[in-house]
Amino acid sequence: MITESKFQQTYNFGFIDESTKKEIRRKLLKAVAIPGYQVPYSSPEMPIARGWGTGGLHATLSLIGPEDIFKIIDQGSDASVNACNLRDFVKRMTNCRTTFDTAEATLIQTRHRKPEEILTDKQIIVFQVPQPEPLRSVERYEFKTRLMHAEADYAKMWVSLYESYVKFGAIMQGAGYPVRVNGRYIMTPSPIPRWDVPNLSMAPCLHVFSAGREKRLHCVPPFTKVEPLEFEDVKFHVEDFGAITCAASGGDKAFMDEIYESETSRKFVMNDSNFMDKVRSGTRPPQRLFTNPTV
Amino acid sequence: MPTLLKVQNVSKHFQLHIQNNKHIPALHDVSFEMDQGDILGLTGKSGSGKSSLMKCIYRTYLVNSGTIQLHTDSGAVVDLATANEHEVLKIRKTEMFYCSQFLSVIPRVPAVDVVAESLTRKGHDHAEARARARDLLDQLGLPQELWDAFPATFSGGEQQRVNVARAIIAAPRFLLIDEPTASLDAKTKDVVIDLVLALKARGTSVVLITHDQHTLERMSSRRLHLEFGRVRELATA
Amino acid sequence: MNYQDSDNGWLLRVRNLTKIYGDPISNSIQYTGPAHGTNICPETDAIVACAEINFDLYPGEVLGVVGESGSGKSTLVQLLYFDQMATGGEVHFKAIDEGKTNIVTLSNQRKRQARSSLMGMVYQNPRDGLNFNFSAGGNIAEKLLMAGNFHVGRIRERASFLLEKTEVPVKRMDNTPATFSGGMQQRVQISKAIANNPPLLFLDEVTSGLDVSVQAKVLDLIRHLQRELGVSMIVVSHDLAVIRMLTDRTLVMKNGRIVESGLTDQILQDPQHPYTQLLVSSLL
């Protein structure tokens, strides 16, 4: 451990140097301009390992300003180790205010969830993405997947959905359900649950998806159509929690975590920690809920 | 009767490139005409060019010089020696039928379907075509148990019956028929002759090759005698 | 070459189609071909896989392409099916822009569209035509999905129908073709190729490598489908028996050129070119 303060350097605001930030912002502008298109970017070294949220940090740190109020969640929780560490890092590098309150935040970084609460046009949400290429499961060569995107050649993707239906009686993709953005590119929404997928469509906030290890970022701009891939007779469904209520807050109609307490009992709690806190305090925030088709 | 076929100065030889460029003459300056509804018998010894001439008309052989003008049903005059392949195929499909000396059929197709196919390719209903095929095979004396068998396994005479049936069932406008009665018994021979004459009565024109004097005499109205690939005599019977 | 330039109902018109690998010089075509006994340019080692290819195909017609290995016959159908990019020449297809467009110059997107709904290809090796990671039904579904059919029920209905027609047990529909016999794999390939009722089908050595009885059944199936669907076909084979059984007309290729073309019975009984004569005399 370095204790001698004379070795400690002062860092640039937001850790990343200004010219690299500029580069990332330019790539973000391109990604906004072509919704769902994966833009390659520099992905500079960060003081954490790739695959632990570097992509999210790149986007966050090049977007954040001194006035921003920052929130970061991991699997819906403000308190998980990864979220805490990254929050401390961003705080030290920017001295910005941080918050748990979804409504108060101006910039939210997330892993694997979009908050239940409706985000506004004053907010940007940054997703940490492990694998930005939705076609990777059906085509292992990058040069081929790029061609497939360029030519909107998505037959293989569709066949894999067909195969999933034939094998299992349903499309089994749980997280990272493939979506078509703005009627053109097929995109992975990062491994968010199906529950969150409909909330990407026509939302007032800007969604930034950033994969540090793969050096790609893509965006869903505000009020952009996002459609989960579905067949005419096999429709997209979100997770069905039925009448299950949260053991901690008593609320329902939110994405739930299943917690096993012993061999025979289990309970459910809301996955979004801030949302649960608000429900518990009796001020349930506005939410957009998706109704599964009856077929 | 109007002219059906006008053959002018047709010569044909084979150039065998892979056997020291061997030159085999087949036809020399053959010219003749035939009218619609005629049955023209080609006569001559083996090797005199009868089959070669017939194959030139059918375009299985390419002539080296000369023209073979066919007056088609639509009134057009087509030179079969030089016509576009597609056009020849169309004429083969609609009005010209070649019945070779030996039955050559697609393997693994039952006899009745071999015969019916001549009708279905002209657009006839499949069931109706099969019914008529059975009728005709019956007339020609092909045992019923063979109708659904593959002709490749048949005897010479049985194959010949299928071959003839296939040629005449669709009443082609122009029939080229090579030794139709060669391996048939006297009774069946007369059935075949009667069937072809019945076609003639309905307007079919026929070019016939036969070594059988009886068949020739009963059928042909005119004869073209070939010797060493040249026309020796063109006579009305 | 005996063809007419007038429009008389052709389906596919090919003019001067050329494919050269490597660096050609202006004389590469002149220095290669059957007269030189090679398709390799002596100056640059460029390979003239095929050149000066001209022919018309008519609706419902079956055209054979015959020649030895390396004569360019597979390259020819691969160019037509857009598996490879032509170096030059023109191809017009009545089903695309009424034949007015040179389809060699189409965008990749339109080429894929054409491949998926207007053409079908059956390769010698089923692995070239089928995705073995998908089930047999999934392979057929791919063609249907590409043509805009997004109804699983109808896709499965059509796939069952096609498999039945090609005599593949429908209960094997959800198995991968890797578990099928060679003959069955070819049948699945054929099902896939005809999934969208294309007016044009390419068959590249489809029976080579199958044992004789299976070969016969696959040929019977192709012949039967041709009759029933009236589809135009280009059949590539080095086997004259296959050519005789399936085709109306035949092109004979050698060293990347067409050396002779004609009605199939004429090619077999009165071959003109020395190479064709050799080929026919080699027939067992």
Image (cartoon, coloured by chain):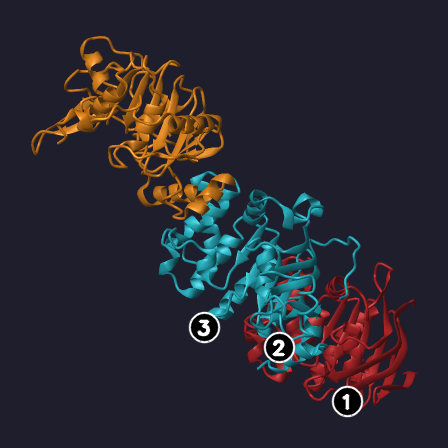
Q: Which chain is red?
A: B
Q: Chain of mark 2?
A: B
Label annotation for residue B47: 1
Horizontal side, residue A158 vs residue B115: left or right: left
Label annotation for residue C211: 3
Is C127 situated above or below B149?
Answer: above
Q: Chain of mark 3?
A: C
The residue under label 2 is: B142
Image location of residue B36, percent across then percent down: 87, 69
Is B203 situated above or below C170?
Answer: below
Whole-number angstrom distance, CA of label 3 to CA of label 1: 40 Å
- Single out the mark in the foreground, 2 or 1: 1
Whole-number angstrom distance, CA of label 3 to CA of label 2: 34 Å
Image location of residue C106, percent across then percent down: 62, 45
Quadrant placement of the C terminus of chain B: bottom right
Q: Residue at the spot x=92%, y=68% of the render?
A: B1
Whole-number angstrom distance, CA of label 2 to CA of label 1: 31 Å
Three-letter residue code for mark 3: Asp
**Furthest residue to the front?**
A6
Identify the colour of chain C in the image.
cyan
Image location of residue C98, percent across then percent down: 70, 45
Disc 2 secondary structure class: loop
Q: Are marks 3 and 2 in contact (CB under 8 Å)?
A: no
- Single out the mark in the foreground, 3 or 1: 3
Classed neighbour count for the residue bearing mark 3: other residues with Cα under 10 Å, few (<14), some (14–19), many (≥20): few
Identify the colour of chain A in the image.
orange
Three-letter residue code for mark 1: Gly
Three-letter residue code for mark 2: Leu
